Image: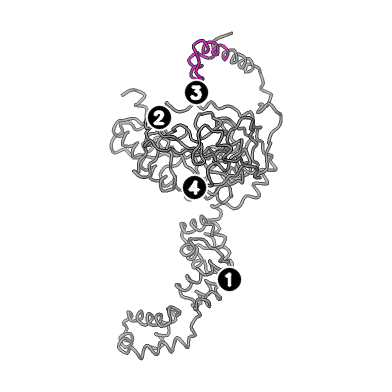
Amino acid sequence: MSAKVQSIPGLGAPADTEWETVVGLEVHAELATETKLFSASPNRFGGEPNTHIDPVSLGLPGSLPVLNEKAVELAIRVGLALNCRIQPSVFARKNYFYPDMPKDFQISQYDQPINVDGWLELPSGKRIGIERAHLEEDTGKTIHIGGGGRIHEAGYSLVDYNRAGVPLIEIVGHPELRSATEARQYVAELRSILVAVKASDGKMEEGSLRVDCNVSVRPVGSDRLGTRCEIKNVNSLRSLGRAIEYESRRQIELLTGGQAIEQQTRHWNEDDGRTHALRSKEEDYDYRYFPEPDLLPLDPSLEWVEQIRQDLPSLPRDRRLRLAEVAPSTDADHIALAVERSMDELALSAIDRGGVPERVMTHIVHNLADGSGKLAAEALAELVEMEEAGELTATQAKKVLALLVESGGSPQEAAQELGFEAMETGELESMVDGLIAQHPDEWSRFCEGDNKLTGFFVGQVMKATQGRADGKAVTQVLQSRKG
Amino acid sequence: MGQQRITRAECAHVAALARLELTDEELDRFTGQLDELLDHVAEVEALDLGGLAPTMHALPIANLLRPDFRGEVLDRDEVLAQAPFAEGGQFRVPPVLGEAP
């Protein structure tokens, strides 16, 4: 074993070594502008190939880039939401030859990015440092056709430039995440923030949010970083967790087996649940960055930045705290879910109008997973009141809610439309009396204290009323008849 | 010319990155020329500019921005007609595998 190899933390470590996973993430998010970063063709997902193109995004000779003001504003919003310092910045050319970038370079920010030195707080309260969040342009999409996927079996590639030039913000976090769970929490929180400040739609499935993760391992207690591998092609939070878990296991096995980790880029394969080597760092590209002479420096004024700061909407963390304050008995996961689904405003408003927090949150979490549609906060509050007053059963309330989501209006009207008018107590009493007469045996067993029979009678009433009756009210009548 | 600032091998590496095929004679000539350029940069670097703010661009202006409004898009058929090969509304290129660098 050479001296160099021995310097890798953990190599040849005893079998009982406890390992720590170290993760640093680079997240690319497409910014929600109307047009591209440097030209006026549309920034829109999908569409027929090569229909969102212009001379700049095709890199035609003589075309010149002009920076999109909205993209800068969105980048500043992200910077502020991530507690970054907003600084003067410049664009650079990152040179490489690949058909996804027809001008043979990508315009990106390099040594002077717009946002630096921020942090993001995980739900646990742990803060993860953000090194930078810079602007760059997205590339086109290439797909390989034929040839069985091996290089010697030729085939060819097709290129669609609709995505070329779409504005991206690349958010580079410090390697301060210590598990797959923390990494998932980080991305989930970052996505919520991006959506909350309306900088991006955050859709991983459409590729508007993409994550590259750097994973290394080291013995617990070591303060040095191990050799890392970068994992690409992680397209969901679930894959992110699986990829990190697989990769850290792979590295631990190599190290405990006395082997070294090779610094390389690896590709996550969702189907076999493994990461595969793409290329090693030695053959990594030399991008020869230099300042982009066709673009002027960016130096947003203090007034502009302040204006953006003032207009910044409330962030997920603050929204969770606010909701938890008015619904203290709801568990943290449900609070987080409500905020993630942007249902917290509705919940707060319904609770503010007198809706019992527990019932409001139950509907928000369990019955409104597909969105609130035309449901007004006032209506949700009234619905909850009707349930509280025993005018609607839980099953009925759910049906009323579904109707309110679909067509709006008040829960009273919706209940009427569904035939859920609360039964008069007199009507219920005479129905119970009828049942007692029809089922004397059951009744006498009930009177002798066999409480299982409560269910029988309630069930009969429900059957007769097609679920219109309130179970609690039926039980009360039964008890009163028992004498 | 003072000490050599760029080697012939470095020049060849840079040429390869730029996909330039140079003859031995060209490689000698360009190594010399790049060396002279770097000499000039070294002269500028030697100046005491401690009291000056760095120049970010040759033009003394910043923040040239355009509003986020849609403009014209190019006609796809017209564009693809100028490409060497096209298929199904896309540019057809020699096989590229794996991911972009």
Residue A306 placement (x, y as % from top left): 67, 45
Residue at image mark 3: B17
Residue A360 placement (x, y as % from top left): 51, 66
Q: Secondary structure at mark 3?
A: helix
Front-most of residues B52 and A34: A34
Instruction: Inspect the image, locate mark 3, and give the three-letter code of the amino acid beneath it.
Output: Leu
Which disc is residue A409 wearing?
A: 1
The reply to the same-chain question for discs 4 and 2 is yes
Q: Chain of mark 4?
A: A
Query: Which range of residues does the magenta coloring cover?
Result: B5-34
Q: Chain of mark 2?
A: A
Residue furthest to the top? B1
Residue at image mark 2: A280
Residue at image mark 4: A206
Separation (CA) of disc 4 from disc 2 = 28 Å
Residue A191 shows up from this direction: yes
The reply to the same-chain question for discs 3 and 1 is no
